[in-house]
Amino acid sequence: MSTLFKKGLFLTNERKIQEFYQHFQTYDEGFEYGSQLPEWFLRNWSKSKRWLLALLETNIPEIKAHRSAKDNSATLMQALLDIVEKETDKQRPNYGLLLLWASLSNAAPIAFWTLAFVLSHPDVHRAILEGMSSVFGTAGKDKIKVSEDDLKKLLLIKWCILEAIRLRAPGVITRKVVKPVKILNYTVPSGDLLMLSPFWLHRNPKYFPEPDSFKPERWKKANLEKHAFLDCFMAFGGGKFQCPGRWFALLEIQICIILILYKYDCRLLDPLPKQSCLHLVGVPQPEGQCQIEYKQRV
Ligand code: HEM
């Protein structure tokens, strides 16, 4: 959030963090229905949405004015506000809320899923720890800085994240048809909803052999240097509306996983959970609880 909006903007004290967390959780849980139904059907959701919008609204002037002290660069939120400059002031907090939701609700569960998949595959876990100690030395209490070069040496972590995304991709991506489109012999009329399921596409053995297995090494074939995923990998959507935060997401999750595994000795206390089928939009949550034990390395 500091990178996307402005450092220290929202989370100033413990009470505020708690309040933010509760409203964001309510907003996230009801998003799928709240974004489609009239708001008075979901009173709590609507209340949390208004709280988050008010928070963004108060902060818009500061978000707009802020420049990075280091190199005077703009944040992603500023770039977004510049693009929508012509829109009325009233809509600006809504763009902020879209960015807030899109950046947290998928990346945070994928960080969890990656960790859970890695911890439930001892060979992969061991290989990652070996790679990390060859880059950062013996894992432990020291503070580390993760450079771009370090990330290139730790490709297995990136493959694990992509494999976790493949297996826990959003259930559906929808598009409202604005002009009639011809697909094979069918014409889809305007106003209809087209839906594509990355979740099921990623389970097609024609494109992903042994589709239900966690196999990070399948990503060896992807030309990630050239920013290309594997064919038929659709977790971020496709075409001109695909997720603009996809490379940022991979970067932040990589750093998050490195820091956790460097600092803590982790193990799963529960079996790897299945994905919950409750929500189809966005990355699924785990079905039931999954505890992770972590001990600080000494
Ligand atoms: C693993 C994490 C993520 C996944 C799986 C994901 C997936 C998606 C998907 C499926 C869409 C809809 C694309 C479409 O409609 O065709 C989307 C849209 C979007 N994502 Fe992400 N996303 C992730 C992380 C992020 C992050 C970290 C950011 C911000 C930095 C972000 C910003 C956005 C925005 C702003 C949109 C709306 C784009 C639009 O409507 O044109 N996402 N994302």
Image (spheres, helix red, strand yellow):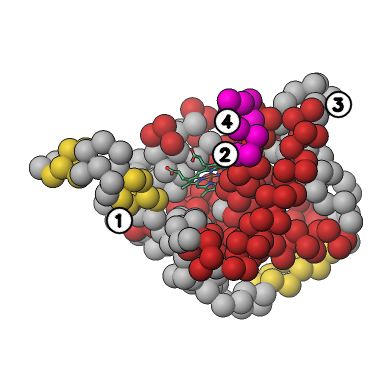
Residue drawn 29% across and 56% down? 205
Cα distance between the residues tagged 2 and 4: 22 Å
Q: In which quarter of the image is the C terminus?
A: bottom right
Q: In this view, does 144 lie to the left or right of 80?
A: right
Which is more toward the observer, 53 or 207?
53
Which image quadrant is residue 8 in?
top right
Query: Label 2, on which residue?
Result: 245
The residues colored magenta run: 81-91
Name the amino acid, label 4. Glu
- Dot 3: what SS? loop
Which label belongs to residue 103? none
Which label belongs to residue 69? 3
Q: Which is in the foreground here, disc 4 or disc 1?
A: 4
Q: Residues within 10 Å of mark 4 (few under 14, many from 20)?
A: few
Question: Most extreme residue toward the left, as rendered?
Answer: 185
Cα distance between the residues tagged 4 and 1: 42 Å
Q: Are marks 4 and 1 in contact (CB under 8 Å)?
A: no
Q: Is mark 2 within 8 Å of ligand 1?
A: yes
Query: Label 4, on which residue?
Result: 87
Query: Label 1, on which residue?
Result: 204
